[in-house]
Amino acid sequence: MTADPASPAEGNGGGEGAGPLHPSPTGFWRARVFSTDHKVIGRQFLWLGLVFLAVAGALAMLIRWQLAHPGQPVPVVGALLFPSTGGSVSAAAYTALFTMHGTIMIFFALTPILIGGFGNFCLPLLIGARDMAFPVLNMLSFWTMFAATGILTASFFTPLGPPAAGWTAYPTLSTAIGAPGVAQTLWVVAIYLNGASSVMGAVNYITTVIRFRAPGMTFFRMPLTVWGLWLAAILNALFVPVLAAGAVLLFFDRVLGTRFFVAGSAIRPGGDPVLYQHLFWIFGHPEVYILILPAWGIAGDLLSFFARKPAFGYRVTVWALIAIVVLSGLVYGHHMFVTGMSPLLGEGFMLLTMIISVPSVVLGVGWLGTLWRGAIRLTTPMLFALGLVVVFGLGGFTGLFLADVLSDVYLHDTFFVVGHFHLTMSAAVLLGAFAAIYFWFPKMFGRLLNEPLGKLHFALTLVTVIVTFGLQLVIGYAGMQRRLADPSVYAWLRPLMPLNRVISTAAFVMGAAQLLFVANFFYSLRWGPKAPPNPWQVGTLEWTLPSPPPHHNFDVIPRVVVGPHELGNPAAKRALGRDYQAQNEALPGEVPRE
Amino acid sequence: MSDVVLAPGAAAQAVDARAEQEAERGATTSVGMIVALSALGMTFASLLLAYAIVRAQSPVWPPPGEAPLPPLWAWRLLGTAASIAGSAAMAATARRARAGRDARKPLAAAAGSGVVFLAAQTAALVALGRAGVGPGAGLAASVVYALCSFHALHVVAALLALTSVLGSVWAEARAGRPPARLARVDAVAAFWHLVTAVWLVVFLGVFVL
Amino acid sequence: MTFLPALPRDASLHGHHVDGILGYLTVTTGICFGVLLAILLVAVAFHRGNRQAHYTHGDRPRDRLPAVIAGVVVLFGIDAVALVRSTERLREGMWRYPDDDPTATRIEVTAQQWAWNFRYPGADGQFGTADDILTLNELRVPVGKPVYVQLTSKDVIHSMYLPNFRTKIDAVPGTITRMWFQPTTAGGYEIGCAQHCGAWHYKMRGELTVLSAEDFARWQVRAAADAALRYEAADAEAHDAWTWRPAP
């Protein structure tokens, strides 16, 4: 009856996280497809996320082509993708491009990579557990996500074209009025299933951290990566359901003809399209924190690891993360300043949104303090973590422009917003996820990625991210709206078209640079040098295991005695002959700090 | 491990270890269920928030231009009674299971109540349709159709959850021991209570007020 | 080629408030980002490689000082200043609707996929009467007087965006929203749509012409005569005006 590997073993002294030492499943389906092993599921999410990152990236290239050369046929692939227009992006196609780019990036790339992928792979290892609390639920969460991707993919091939109401899908454009085809309904279903997958994952992550930490792994000894993932899971559990509610009502409006978001008129009573925006953004704002929290956590750990000293102000950092999580639910109205909301509400949301800048600043100070007077090793993961600090700093500060109602009324729906969220989201996925991949690739796949190629990938990515999205801030400042298939329709925007071409060029280089990563990834999977257990020489628990770890993770559940960032301790240097101390490694004669 | 003073024999030790294992597993299941029910609660809370907003924004209810909906009290009250009965039965099931007594009867009663609820809800929606009030008839009708059908889907889910503990309750009733997965029975009961609580809010908020 | 952030020509009474806050935020956040970057680059340049890292957890009281200072600077130097100044400017500008100003030009805007319908009340000052002036995509207003606009949409959400007046407001089906501005310089300006409203959202362009008082009066006379010719009592759709919403 007790077949699941996560129940405690006898005599193992390890609490809930210690499971019996099962042999790994051997059949193809149980071992590779419907596995309940968090490491396999994590890799499945990573593959899914990377594939869709590439798809969404390709869509972005098409968007950038259209903005640089409106109406001109797309080279090479144009005739194949847009046969009816001779290879150029039509107005309707453009709206589908930015809709699917945004939808896929947020829900089907960022989420699966950072949360499904690294969350699953790393969480049990980092806290000293054998698996997640609910391994079967974990497996179901992946396959639910997979089903969602199937439905979203299907929506590309419907008679009236793919979903085209923006990733935000505001009614009434997303109701039968603005989107008569079946694609938008499929979009709603895909989003709902994606949300269900996220909530299943959240149940697992939250429970696992609460119940499965190894003995001695107190909350304040957890790596910041775990904090980031755990807090993101809490936000997921609380706020994805709000999106689900909005999706359900939109689904009913489209399929049953209910009138929640379909506006009333003199002859036909109806609902309020703006109601959707409330539901959407009550989810939507926490969502951006869901996406960045794991990246913040990873960056916090990596900066410490590669500066060879503890994270500066670990506790204060954790409280800042918690403060951001609490505030994130209270600020959503800043997305709706121009919907005609009352000035009082506007002032309230402005105040709360600005307050969030304070804990964010605390995070930044912590990162700088970690670097200061360190012995910095500029490995590829470290470079990406540093890049995240720079890009998030830039993107984060631009958030203040949007928090202030006075400036936001002008900047809303311009490329300034696009630049702001692309800088912060790129910090999360293009820098944070790559940092994670370069860091944990050895542990996941047992081989090392090529360092020089990684550094080149970093340099090109960082420069092109800053140029592409920084210049979008500039072009938005000059007033150019977003989601325009051809901005040159407006006389005042025509002088900005050369700038659009510069942005597009930077974006094309960014896209091309990712091929370096793809090549490195696949080459190293097969032919990379074999990875030792601890190539980065750090002390978190996953690095005490072989690369890759065995099915059951830990032979013996470790007993944790110190925090995750015990590097540079002179006492450890004397006792152990190296500058780091593993979390389950007590120094001779030392009483562990609580 | 609990403090066992001179265990009399290996068998007793194994039972203790197993009991502790179950307790640990039970605590994990409870935590997981709390998170899951919080998430589900947030979904319903959001739907009810949406209803509260559209209702508050309208000067009268139903909004101007919409005819009042037939209340169909017979079906609604039957459904409400079934919902409460189902929760009571699930609570009894959990209590009996914990005490090691035969919990089959209350479990079956819960299942029956769930079915009665679904039947009453379906009949009510069909009756509404027959009276010419479809989902698109207006905002009030939209609220009734959307909330009732979404809630009913979760009653179906609750019945499915019930079948997941059916086997163990049945088997353990025969052998006379508490179900190995007590926490699961508690969890299923908690799910039922949430679904009932949501219905009571819907009933009061949509039909009574 | 424009590399510096060049704001569109400001032709409004209160636009400079927006430019002011944009400038203030650019300078202050620019300085903060510069400091962040400088510290990071110095650390990466000089605190590298085979040296003894300074072993500290940064959790002593005096280690908290940098975070406190940074927090205070941002909270009071940027956030509070912006909040107070912007709120003041909003209350005396954008949020002070000219409900009681008889000189304000009132216009009802009905947005649709993909055009702007403008309706003037005409000589009788009432919307929905025979002397209403209706224009498509062309908005003419007098200089130096408030322009008070109420909006709705026939289909999906649109957003009326006036870059030269630093303002925009959504046009929501089933709701009446409002916005006001005061042109200070005669000339031709563009109206953009700033809410994705379908395939031809990018073409939903209007022209705002600010005229001198005399030119505006002359135009009104011509337009009124034209409206009288066009008016058709039986054309129900042309009469989709609403009663002007008074101040809430």
Image: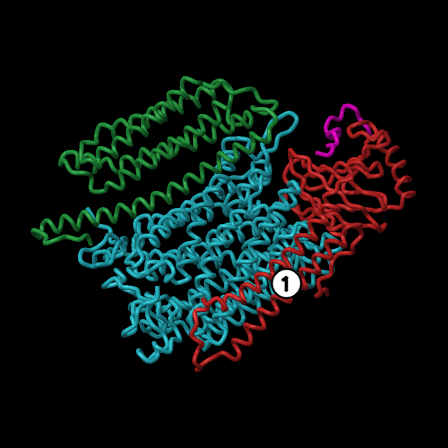
Chain colours: A cyan, B green, C red
- Which chain letter matches label 1? C
Against A141, residue C217 (above or below) is above
Q: Main secondary structure of the magenta part?
A: loop
Q: Secondary structure at mark 1?
A: helix
Q: Position of residue C224 (x, y in %)?
A: 87, 33
**Is residue A45 among the parts visible in the rendering?**
yes
Q: Residue A43's image quarter?
A: bottom left
Q: Position of residue A308 (x, y in %)?
A: 42, 74
Q: Is residue C244 magenta?
A: yes
Label 1, on which residue?
C29
Against C50, residue A453 (above or below) is above
**Is residue A508 among the parts visible in the rendering?**
no
Of A117 and A377, the residue lying toward us: A377
Q: Residue A519's image quarter?
A: bottom left
- The residue sitting at 50% across, 68% down in the picture is C62
Q: Position of residue A463 (x, y in %)?
A: 57, 69
Q: Residues within 10 Å of mark 1 (few under 14, many from 20)?
A: many
Whether residue A464 sits left or right of residue C222 in the image: it is: left
Q: The N terminus of chain C appears in which quarter of the rendering?
A: bottom right
Of all residues, the one furthest to the front in this rendering is: C61
Q: What span is in magenta?
A: C230-248
Of A530 and C21, the residue lying toward us: C21
Whether residue A90 sits left or right of residue A582 in the image: it is: right
Q: The C terminus of chain C appears in which quarter of the rendering?
A: top right
Q: Position of residue A211 (x, y in %)?
A: 31, 52
Q: Is residue A187 magenta?
A: no
- The residue sitting at 62% across, 52% down in the picture is A403
Amino acid, disc 1: Thr
State how many labels appear: 1
- The residue sitting at 59% across, 39% down in the picture is A274
- The residue sitting at 14% across, 48% down in the picture is B15
